Image: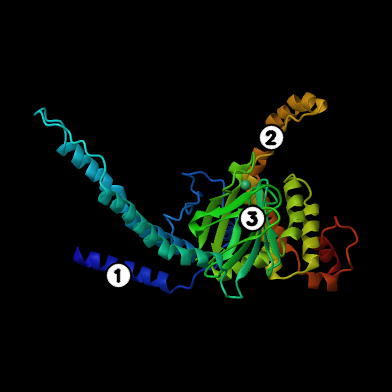
Amino acid sequence: MSRLLMSLLAVVALLAACAGWSPAAEPTIDEYVQIFNPDLLARVGDANHIERTSTFTHPESSDISTWVMENTWFSFIIFLPFLILPQVLLVHVMLKFRDRRDGRRPATFMHNVKLENLWTGIPILALVIVAFPVYPLLYKMELPPEDRDAMVVTVRGRQFAWDYEYKKEGVSLGLDLVSSIQEPLVLKKDKAVVLDITSSDVNHAWWVPAFGIKKDAIIGRFNRAWFTPRIAGPFRGQCAELCGQGHGVMIIGAVVAEPDVFDRWVELQRHRNDSQKVWDALIAWDLKGDDAPIRASVSEYLKKSDGDSRRWALQYWMAHNATSYTRRSPDRPQRGTKAEDIETYPARLEEWKSKLVPAWRDSLEALPDRRQRIDAIIAAMPMVAQIEIAAPPVAQADVALADVVSEETP
Ligand SMILES: [Cu+2]
């Protein structure tokens, strides 16, 4: 029995050691999609629900939230006696001076100057004690870090989304191109970030509690905030200024990535717009007929520049878009205010119910097939350098390059 136990322990130890020694595996494309494209609208209880939404539960998320939390606890400890003492005194007095029906008369005195001075003076002292560490902290929060290497992002609120612009990285994002759901701000772990927060229309406020940051977004001015994210993962916040009808869905997402993963994300952004045409061709394809339009769009994409990272980016964006595609059904038609719109509304609504939504549901089932197809096409597409040597330039966009090459290469 003990020998069995010993050998079992040995196996476990060996496995643990192997796990510890093996180098961290490169995330797969789907794992990258999970990191960069979290479901910001997932509700409590969903597997994808983002839990980092509070300074209280995640005070280690940024340097600022750690300081804010330390300060909050300090203030809380100082104020705690003021919370408890009156309750204790109240219960004590209620019990001790209750009417015992022995004929005692209640006291009739009104003032006690000494006592009143005391219970004015002590709270003032408590406020002063609490204010002491707060002012340097407020000052520190207002002052962006001296580190000139800090990341700078312009944050622009609008009804009802956030646009982000990374000056140095040359990246901008906002609503997802496929789902029109807010995209998260992606940040580098342990790298200070300076946010220049403004608005394009009404007042908004950028608020991610776990980072300890909340700043008004006001048209015509830039409010500056900064922090250093300290743990990797997804975070969620919310617009904190009632800004109109869509205020409730004006969520704020943030993803903190390890430095190498962040660099990967920046690289991916360079290929995003070009990849969109391939996606359009892929989603328009009926799965049965000729896939020449998809192949043509892939070769068009690769013609601009080719290489492993560009190909990898195309695969990534197809996976990313497929994930986004599952998150939102076609928009419900609006009734409108014009007479003709109101007249056609029942028909449009019926079409949406009976055609558009079922078609979207059906196409969800076909997504894995589409992905397999596009991965195969990308893998089979010859490198552009090869094509240029082997074949004359292709005149027609709908002629697949793969075919041209296979015909003309001896
Ligand atoms: Cu808002």
Query: Badge 3, how many Cα within 10 Å: few under 14, some, many 20+?
Result: many
Of callouts 3 and 1, the N-terminal one: 1
Of callouts 3 and 2, the N-terminal one: 3
Image position of 402 (left or right of 110): right
> Which of the two marks, 1 or 2, is nearer to us in this view?
2
Image position of 13 (left or right of 237): left
Which residue, as the protein is rendered here, is positioned at the far left?
Answer: 102
- The amino acid type, in three-letter code, at marker 1 is Ala
Q: Which residue is mark 2?
A: 332
Query: Badge 2, how many Cα within 10 Å: few under 14, some, many 20+?
Result: few
- The amino acid type, in three-letter code, at marker 3 is Ala
Q: Which residue is mark 3?
A: 319
Of callouts 1 and 2, the N-terminal one: 1
Name the residue rendered at 28%, 67% in the picture: 9
Q: Quadrant of the C terminus?
A: bottom right
* Ligand 1 within 8 Å, label 1 CB: no
User: In what element is the residue under mark 3?
Assistant: helix
- The amino acid type, in three-letter code, at marker 2 is Arg
Q: Which residue is mark 1?
A: 10
> How far from the left and from the top, in percent, is residue 360?
67, 39
Viewer-proximal residue among 208 and 180: 208
Name the residue rendered at 76%, 26% in the picture: 347
Image height of 3 relative to 125, above or below:
below
Viewer-proximal residue among 347 and 210: 210
User: In what element is the residue under mark 2?
Assistant: loop
> How far from the left and from the top, in percent, is residue 139?
51, 66
Image height of 85 relative to 317, above or below:
above
> How far from the left and from the top, in percent, is residue 395?
91, 61
Q: Quadrant of the N terminus?
A: bottom left
Spatial distance from mark 3 to mark 2, Cα to Cα? 25 Å
Name the residue rendered at 79%, 73% in the picture: 385
Spatial distance from mark 1 to mark 2, Cα to Cα? 60 Å
